[in-house]
Image (cartoon, rainbow, N blue to C red):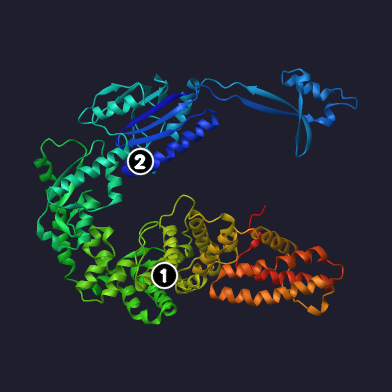
Amino acid sequence: MGKELLLEIGTEEIPADFLPKALKDMEEIIGREFAQARIRHGVVRTLATPRRLVLCGEDVAEQQEDQVVEKLGPAKRVSYDDEGNPTKAALGFAKSQGIDISEVGTVVTEKGEYICVRKVIKGEETAASLPEILKRFILSIPFQKSMRWMNLDIRFARPIHWILALYGGEVVSFKLGNVSSGNKSYGHRFMSPGPFAVDGFSDYIKETLDRYVVVDPEGRKAIIVTETERAAKTVSGLVLSNDELLEEVNYLVEYPSAVCGSFDAEFLELPGDVLITSMVGHQKYFPVVDDKGKLLPHFIAVNNTLVRNPEVVVKGNEKVLRARLSDAKFFFREDRKIPLEEHFEKLKRVVFHSLLGTSYEKVGRFRKLAGLIAEKVDPVLKENVDRAAHLAKADLETRMVYEFPDLQGVMGREYALLAGENPVVARAIYEHYLPTSAGGKLPQSDEGSIVSIADKMDTICGFFGVNQMPTGAADPYALRRQALGVINIVLNKGYPLSLGNLVDESLAILADRLKRPREEVKRDVLDFFKGRLENQLITQGYSYDVVDAVLSAGFHDLVQTVKKVKAMEDFKKRPDFEPLGVAFKRVCNIIKGFENGRVDASRFTQREEGALYQAYLETRDRVGAFIDKGDYERALRELAGMRKCVDEFFEAVLVMAEEGEVRFNRLSLLEAISKLFYRIADFSKIVTG
């Protein structure tokens, strides 16, 4: 049995969005540290509030595992003479290792047999290793931003004020910056700020709770849900569900309590999204709705303390929200005095990017591209697509969006409806921004989907064209998210679009802005899309080799590519898949570097050549028909039927015959078969046993 490890890092308030990732990283980092130190351990828990990061490791072994170290010496052939006696080389090696020659062993390596010595390094006590491990652990936790404070040469998300470190109830003693570890923690900053001693995790949880700190994020979240629901019931309402807000508020407080406030009913005349953004985005309030989902003139504020005088707190929150809503009402009224067309004209003075021109020019580009896409998807859509693209960015010059950037698209839709635009156009204006996050909601209308694809393609191709590509760590223009957006919209709608053609058309429209050769930009953009699609499919559970095999054979038609991946993944589970993969790999390996073959059946000299060619001709037509229908499972079954003929061919026929024309003909036959398989996937990428 091991001992319990408890670590608490007490800090200034850490930003809420830093904490969820920090908790995951802490588990991974301590796991690596323990593994490298050869320390066995049980379950690891990580907890956090804005002012503390906590780690508890159960059953942490009291001693490192012993380590066997193997040291190679000279090759065995030079270490012993013909009679088996050790040479000077062997004796010298034994002496250098401080052992007798009788203790020397041998080991077989890829380069041959060598003499060696195996030493057992006794593991030291865990308590002796923990100070350095915990110091490394703390300083290894990655944050979006970190800082230095005072004149200390360490960095962390926020200044560290105390460190609680216990192993088996005893202090793990070390110093980090100007803070020495100990057995003391601190309560709530306002309601119980003093220190208190701790002797273990269960004691820590009890003592912090007694001092108005709920350390467990899940426990805190449950309290917030209960408190907000209770507060909403006081006005016969329900809390408008918002998981992102719940997560954020959860990491803003240590001891949550909720109050219900109100605002003037006249503000309900504003669009609902304006009200929600004012409450959620700026004040972190939970909106209140009735049982039909309609907004009520109330909100829920979550506080970080017990409220002694709820009336004072409510009035303060109401005052702040009233000011925000009054501004929104004024902006809404003023924006409506100017037609959307005039707002659009103002885009001429808005720089989208110094190398890509104004937002006005950008709209002109993706409007043209949207028209080309609509022509392929459904020409009937062109008129509404064109109008939606024309007005898509007009709201960027409204006062409402300037004040509330999150409402771009939302206000475009609202102002378009108020101006009497076709509701289809208004909806597309809003939807063209979707998805706004990875895995976010996709546009549902064709008009919105097409304008969204066009806008995102122009952005991606534009930035690649002016050498502003994402790097490993930085993606300032969110090009990865936009590429995934294009992929998921096309897949969701099932559009038969060629990614290569989309890139060509976008680059043609961008021609006067490009700073790199067009073909070079196209290659890089397509590789970028391939990487995004590959990552997404693997994340969804498809095998890496299947995804690689299908994408290597072409991925421009995204819908058909995903169908192929699904068919290949299912087919891979069949018993005849691996022999098929092995057979095709033989084909690929032998024709490597060969191309532009021409099969001449009159030059076949062996029965197996003719049999394979006949099987190929019959299979080619059937496979082609199934591929044209998108029935890749049936196409794969047909290809599998060729395996017997392929195997017999290789058993009986020498492909690399001495006679040049015979060899050329046999290679040509295998090349033709390879191309047939390649219509679905590059089987040489498939991992076989």
- Please state which amino acid type lies under the numbered disc 1: Lys
Closer to us: 203 or 30: 203
The part of the image, by quadrant, that contains residue 455 is bottom left
Out of 682 and 72, give the one closest to the viewer.
682
N-term mark: 2 or 1:
2
- Any part of residue 141 in sight: no
Disc 2 crowd rating (10 Å Cα; few below 14, some 14-19, many 20+) is many
Q: Can residue 184 be seen in this view?
A: yes
- Check the image and report above or below for 323 versus 152: below
Q: Which residue lies furthest to the right in this view?
A: 82
Q: Compared with residue 381, is residue 235 higher up or lower down, i.e. above or below?
A: above
Label 2's element? helix
Picture disc at residue 493: 1
Where residue 523 appears, x then y in whole percent? 55, 65
Image quadrant assignment for residue 21 = top left
Residue type at the position of mark 2: Leu
Number of residues whose C-alpha sits closer than 10 Å to that of mark 1, classed few (under 14), some (14–19) or many (20 or more): some
Viewer-nearest of discs 2 and 1:
1
Q: In this rendering, is residue 257 above or below 288?
A: above
Q: Residue at x 20, y 45 (%)?
A: 228
Q: Quadrant of residue 353?
A: bottom left
Q: In this view, does 156 lie to the left or right of 559?
A: left
Relative image position of residue 401 (x, y in whole percent): 25, 61
Q: Which mark is residue 19?
A: 2
Q: Is residue 216 left or right of residue 212?
A: right
Depth order, front residue of 636/11 = 636
Measuring from the top left, give residue 170's x and y in whole percent: 40, 18
Give coordinates of residue 371: x percent, y percent: 40, 78
Disc ID at residue 100: none
Q: What's the CA distance linking mark 2 and mark 1?
A: 36 Å
The reply to whether discs 2 and 1 touch (Cβ–Cβ < 8 Å) is no
